[in-house]
Amino acid sequence: MTCAAIKYMIIEARKTQPDALYIVNLSTFKGGQLYLDVSHMHNALDYMPLSLNKFNMAHDLVSRSEFKGLDALEYYLAIIRFHSRWNDLKPWIFGPGNISLKLSNHAASYCRKAFNNESVLMLNNDVRETIPKDVGDVLEDLLDYCDEQHVKVLFVKSPQVVNEKGQGRMNAMEDILEARGYPCLDLLEDMYKADIDPRTDFYNKGHTNIHGSMKFSKAVGDYLVENYSFEDKRGLPGWESWDAAMETYNVYREMYTLPLEREHARRFFSDIPALAKKAVEEQRARVSWTEVEEVDGYAVFRRTNRNGAKNPWKWIADVGADVNEYTDDGLKASIEYIYTVVPYREADGTREYGSFDVLGVSVKTKGEKA
């Protein structure tokens, strides 16, 4: 998203939600440029209902961009731009599922991939970089509008890999926000406080996967509950699309995360047990894992994959800290089973869980299907 569009999106949303709290991702400003190319311009404009506000946004974006004359016309009128990738367009790209949940058209990556960002992650709130004038002007214009209209805004620094210049610019912007009385929830510097693991909770450098998104959502939710008061609109007329979006999110959550994650059980940062399949038979499989120090045991979880349809993870066993393999009996022939192992500690009747392989190890039993 181009940060130059944020003010106009708030104006549009306030037509129906004038008293809402607006959450703005400060990472939108980190690049040091306005991103007023073809794709970013259309991303901002194409979903905006036709109104004077849309024309004002188009005029503002165009005036800040390099598009002039007839080249700018398509941003005022709904004109399809010709491009050379028509063969890449598929019917599913335009399906409703692609707009019901952010990144839902990347479900394979969002839910089934873990990208290790630990070695490239930078967390430094002390560095400062000069904010480019055009980006700084957009931020100040947004804040001026929010001041004039008494708009409640919460800025958030989201967890992602940001280089030193990008983090320095966001830190400098955070100074401006603090001086002008706007809160900023820092879930980049405080990533570990939100239990977000850079080894397992991302699907690329810029986005969390389903595991990281759950932790991010909880951290934001906890902050909102602590600092704001909201009317519960679940189930009310006019809010059906929000309820439907939550149902969609819950489907992803149920399918791709462990019960302990959905329950937001207490966590600790540990080594990740390295998994391996040891032996496979028609009705039996044995998996092993590397030892994790200073734990009380391991919880073993399993799921099945039938013709690409994966069932939710289920707990199947607890084993002691001195055990590093598990034999699973009574399986069905020619079925893919996926296992993962989570180290845990127990104190005063409470269990907390360590880090684990979110993808698991796959085992396909032998024999013919029944």
Image (tube, helix red, strand yellow):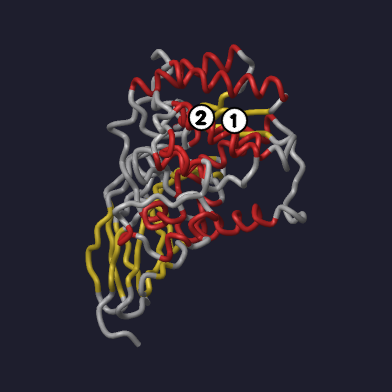
Q: Where is mark 1, residue-wise? A: 7
Within the image, what quadrant is residue 362 found in? bottom left
Q: Does the rendering let one see residue 187?
A: no
Within the image, what quadrant is residue 278 found in? bottom left
Rendered position, 24 above or below 257: above
Rendered position, 367 above or below 181: below
Q: Return the residue nearer the eye: 101 or 78.
A: 78
Q: Of all residues shown, which one is farthest toward the front? A: 69
Q: Secondary structure at mark 2?
A: helix
Instruction: Please tell me the numbered disc located at residue 337.
Output: none
Q: Position of residue 206 (x, y in %)?
A: 38, 38
Q: Position of residue 110 (x, y in %)?
A: 41, 51
Image side of residue 277 versus residue 60, left or right: left
Q: Return the residue nearer the eye: 338 or 142.
A: 142
Q: Position of residue 42 (x, y in %)?
A: 46, 43
Within 10 Å of the Cα at label 2, are there few (<14), some (14-19), or many (20+) other Cα atoms?
many
Q: Where is mark 2, residue-wise? A: 4
Q: Amino acid at mark 2?
A: Ala
Q: Residue at x 68, y 20 (%)?
A: 147
Q: Position of residue 144 (x, y in %)?
A: 63, 19
Check whether the beta carbons of the residues at disc 1 and disc 2 lie within 8 A of each other: yes
Q: Amino acid at mark 1?
A: Lys
Cα separation between marks 1 and 2: 7 Å
